[in-house]
Each structure stands twice: as structure tokens, then as C-alpha cells.
């Protein structure tokens, strides 16, 4: 009987949850769910100087926001240091590791000599077969693995195919430092084995690590998990993804107004595809995901595509849920006035959302579009809207405001009829009346239908805002 699938997401808590790491987590999650298995979470906090509690929380928060729930309790790698040392001792006993007493000065000289001879600056194995009795006084040893000196190490990879490494190109790397702490290379293998990980899905920058880690697996006689090394995400220009391209933390995308379902949909399509499907649900991703469908070439991050997908989910979103996201986003982004305005005008915002949703691609745009509801007088008028408020337009606004005072049935049909009659009396098309009204009432050139705006903000506020911009004859 085949072992149940177990994947793992193993970030280092040295900063925010990077967008590329979020995609790696997604692929691990989708594969585990596809096969009814588990995705485990391991925090690789062995770098004590750079690891922070804030970064750990950022990882938890980012995964939770994306809906990537992990199984079992998260494992903190540093807490397993004694287990890592125990395996090191076993490798020593098996003859697959040894003590190295090189000083920092020895290693520096070794690198210089290698460079001078045109060789790669690797450790030369000088303590591989020496007796520890020859150890110099006062040097705390490290423990190195005995890498094979001939033959090949083969990585059978779901994405990269068969990758062959020449043993002669590997050195005897350190698995336990002189202070007794494990190196990343060693701790990862021990943890993956003890966690019963069956599939390792990670970035292809770890492909060379795979060859070294297989040396440890072989030394312990452990089964090597299946591997899938996915290409990293590049920017639109083909260069390595940087902050200018979008290499930001997941939390930054939340503050920028992206919905988690849009992020999941977009990240899933970065390096993986299922036919021509552009929009897919979490369940469809789980149903369709296969490691063999991962692309071998690097995916390119595209903000325009992300915005398009986000716009789809905003259009399809339920107003109640979008309202809550708007308040939370405004609060998190430090837009206190918007958070207050949204909270105090919930009923009106909810009524306006069906009109606003088709016009927005991000939650921030939704907030901007909703500002007309709670903006205080006199409104701040955007430059493009101000161009609509010519002297003639302001005079017309003043005249039309007087007509509106007499409208007792404050409804869209009644206001529409009054506006059409006014436009006809002036020999104008309705748009020539409506656009200046929009500028005066919202301060923008884009809004819900202008008669809907008037009903939403009410008669008194409508007349007040028109009065602020009107020229009376």
C-alpha cells in the first residue's frame, strides 16, 4: 500500500512571506489536497540572528489570508537541534561523516590556493581520512559528510526531468558546526525524513541542494522523497523578480487591494496551467493539479494580468463581503478617514456597491469610488473632473439645482425626467448636463449613474454639493 502523500512548506522567518514563497506553498497545498494527503508547515528558524517572531507571524497570517491551511502543528526547526545532532553522530558511527579541524585561516588559504590553480574554491578533504589524534589544540571541529568521490548523483525530478550531478563536483560539506548547531543542508533532510515527507516541491534554486541532500539520505539508508523543483518567478522583462516587479510580501498585496481568491488564481497560473482555464476556483485547482503539468520555463509576473483577475473577483463578489474587506483594507492601509466613513455609512455603501463593482479592479479603487458617499463639503475636485466645471456648466448646475428643489419624489425616474427636460430646454444632450453634475457631486469623472448618486446621498446633500459648485445668475 502506497504511503499517504505528505508535502511541506518550509519558509525561513527572516522577512515577509514573499510572493514566490506563497506560490510554492500553494503548489504544496494543492498537491496534498489533490491526493487526500497532508501539507505540513515547518519554520526553518536555525538562522537565529535573522529569524524574528514578527516574520513567523507574517508567514502564518499570509497563509491564513490566502486560505492555505496546513495540517498538524507547525514545526520549529531550531527546537529539533538535538535530533539533528543525533543523526550526525549516527553518520559518524556509520563512517559517512568525519571531524574536520581546519581553522578559518586554513580554509581561507585553501580557497586562495584553489583559485590560483584555477580550481573551484572547495574544501579539499584534508581531514577526511586523518585520525582525530592529529587534531591541533584549541580548534573546535566541525563535522563534514563524506560525499562520494566518483560516479553520479541523479535527481529524478517531476519538473526538471533527470538531472545528473558528477560526484567529483561535490565537496565534503559541513553538516554540524563547531558550536553543535546543524547546517541548513543537514537539518532539512532529517526533518523531511522524520515528518514522513513524500514529495518535496520547492524552487529550482534548491536543485543543487538536492544532490547534496541525497548524499545524506544515502548515508542514513533513507528513502529519498519525490522532488519537483519549480522555476522561479521573473519580472515582465525576464529578469529575476525584484521589488520593482512585484516581489513584495503577501501582506502588501492585501493592502494594495487584492482579494485572496484572485491571488490564488493568479499564482496558480504562474508556472502551471490546465488547458485554457484562466479563472479557476480553489476546488478546481485541487481537482486538476498535477506536478507533471508544471512548466519548466520561468513564469513572468504581470501586474496587468493580476489586476484583470482581481477585477473579475470584485465584479463577482457579494456586497456584504466586499464591504467588510473595504473597511479592513482601509484600516490596514492607514486610511482612517475612509475606514470611518465606510463604517458610518454602511447601508449606503452596500446599496452603492453593485454600481461600483464593475468599475473597480482593486479594493482600493472600490474605496476611492465609494468616497463620494461620505466626502465632506466642499468636495475636493480631481483635475480631470474640474475640467468639466466650466463657467457655462456651473451656471447650468445652479439652474438645475433650483429645479431639483421642487422635485418631491426623490427617485431615479423623477430625477432622470427632470434632467432630460432641463437638457432639452437648453438644447443639450443629456451627457452635457450629467458629466458636470458628476464632477460637482463626486469630484470625479467616474461614478455610479449620476441619478443613483443623487438618491444615495439624499436630496439635502445633493443640493448642498451642487450649491458649492454653482454660479447663480
Image: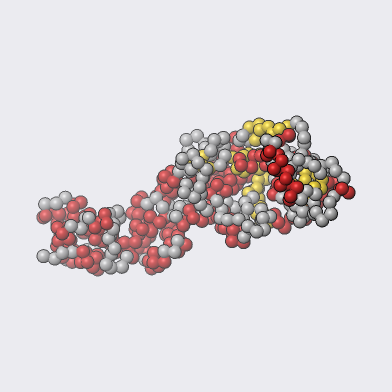
Q: Residue at x 42, y 55 (%)?
A: 363
Give residue 79's quadrant in the image: bottom right
Question: Which quadrant of the figure contains the C terminus?
Answer: bottom left
Give the total of numbered labels: 0
Provide residue 60's location: percent of width, then percent of height. 59, 57
Provide residue 294's location: percent of width, then percent of height. 57, 37
Q: Residue at x 27, y 67 (%)?
A: 378
Would residue 341 be visible to someone looking at this image? yes
Q: Quick one: 163 or 318, which is closer to the camera? A: 163
In this rendering, position of residue 133 left or right of residue 377? right
Provide residue 189's location: percent of width, then percent of height. 72, 46
Name the residue at the right extreme.
133
How is the structure coloured here?
Answer: secondary structure
Q: Residue at x 50, y 47 (%)?
A: 242
In this rendering, position of residue 248 left or right of residue 182? left
Give residue 161's quadrant in the image: top right
Q: Quick one: 461 or 365, which is closer to the camera? A: 365
Would residue 450 be visible to someone looking at this image? no
Question: Which quadrant of the figure contains the N terminus?
Answer: top right
Q: Residue at x 44, y 64 (%)?
A: 334
- When the figure is inspected, residue 418 is found, relative to residue 213, above or below; the finding is below
Provide residue 4's location: percent of width, then percent of height. 69, 43
Q: Quick one: 423 or 132, which is closer to the camera? A: 132
- When the figure is inspected, residue 150 is found, relative to residue 172, above or below; the finding is above
Amino acid at each position: 500500500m502506497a504511503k499517504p502523500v505528505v508535502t511541506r512548506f518550509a519558509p525561513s522567518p527572516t522577512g515577509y512571506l514573499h510572493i514566490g514563497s506563497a506560490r510554492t506553498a500553494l503548489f504544496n497545498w494543492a498537491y496534498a489536497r489533490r491526493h487526500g494527503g497532508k501539507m505540513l508547515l515547518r519554520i526553518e528558524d536555525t538562522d537565529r540572528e535573522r529569524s524574528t517572531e514578527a516574520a513567523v507571524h507574517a508567514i502564518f497570517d499570509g497563509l491564513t489570508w490566502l486560505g492555505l491551511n496546513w495540517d498538524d502543528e507547525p514545526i520549529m526547526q531550531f527546537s529539533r537541534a538535538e535530533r539533528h545532532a543525533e543523526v550526525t553522530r549516527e553518520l559518524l558511527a556509520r563512517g559517512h561523516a568525519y571531524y574536520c579541524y581546519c581553522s578559518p585561516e586554513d580554509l581561507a588559504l585553501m580557497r586562495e590556493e584553489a583559485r590560483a590553480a584555477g580550481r573551484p574554491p572547495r574544501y579539499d578533504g584534508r581531514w577526511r581520512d586523518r585520525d582525530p589524534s592529529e587534531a591541533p589544540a584549541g580548534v573546535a571541529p566541525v563535522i563534514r559528510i563524506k560525499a562520494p568521490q566518483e560516479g553520479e548523483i541523479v535527481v529524478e525530478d517531476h519538473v526538471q526531468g533527470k538531472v545528473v550531478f558528477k560526484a567529483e563536483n561535490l565537496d565534503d560539506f559541513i553538516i554540524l558546526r563547531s558550536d553543535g548547531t546543524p547546517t541548513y543542508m543537514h537539518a532539512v533532510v532529517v526533518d523531511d525524513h522524520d515528518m514522513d515527507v513524500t514529495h518535496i516541491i520547492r524552487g529550482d534554486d534548491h536543485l543543487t541542494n538536492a544532490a547534496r541532500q541525497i548524499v545524506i539520505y544515502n548515508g542514513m539508508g533513507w528513502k529519498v522523497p519525490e522532488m519537483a523543483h519549480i522555476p522561479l518567478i521573473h519580472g515582465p522583462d525576464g529578469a529575476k523578480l525584484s521589488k520593482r516587479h512585484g516581489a513584495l510580501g503577501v501582506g502588501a498585496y492585501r493592502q494594495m487591494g487584492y482579494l485572496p481568491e484572485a491571488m490564488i488564481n493568479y499564482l496558480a497560473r504562474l508556472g502551471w496551467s490546465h488547458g485554457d482555464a484562466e479563472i479557476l476556483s480553489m476546488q478546481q485547482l485541487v481537482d486538476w493539479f498535477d506536478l507533471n503539468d508544471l512548466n519548466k520555463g520561468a513564469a513572468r509576473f504581470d501586474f496587468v494580468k493580476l489586476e484583470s483577475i482581481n477585477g473579475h473577483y470584485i465584479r463577482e463578489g457579494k456586497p456584504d463581503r466586499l464591504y467588510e474587506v473595504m473597511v479592513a483594507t482601509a484600516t490596514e492601509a492607514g486610511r482612517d478617514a475612509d475606514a470611518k466613513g465606510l463604517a458610518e455609512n454602511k447601508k449606503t455603501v452596500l446599496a452603492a456597491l453593485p454600481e461600483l463593482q464593475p468599475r473597480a479592479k482593486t479594493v482600493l479603487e472600490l474605496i476611492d469610488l465609494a468616497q463620494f458617499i461620505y466626502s465632506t463639503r466642499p468636495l475636493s475636485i480631481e483635475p480631470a473632473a474640474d475640467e468639466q466645471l466650466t463657467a457655462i456648466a456651473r451656471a447650468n448646475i445652479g439652474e438645475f439645482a433650483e429645479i431639483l428643489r421642487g422635485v418631491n419624489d426623490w427617485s431615479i425616474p423623477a430625477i432622470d425626467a427632470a434632467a432630460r427636460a432641463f437638457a432639452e430646454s437648453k438644447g443639450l444632450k443629456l451627457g452635457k448636463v450629467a458629466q458636470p453634475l458628476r464632477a460637482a457631486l463626486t469630484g470625479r469623472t467616474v461614478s455610479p449613474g449620476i441619478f443613483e448618486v443623487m438618491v444615495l446621498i439624499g436630496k439635502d446633500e445633493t443640493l448642498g454639493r451642487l450649491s458649492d459648485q454653482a454660479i447663480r445668475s
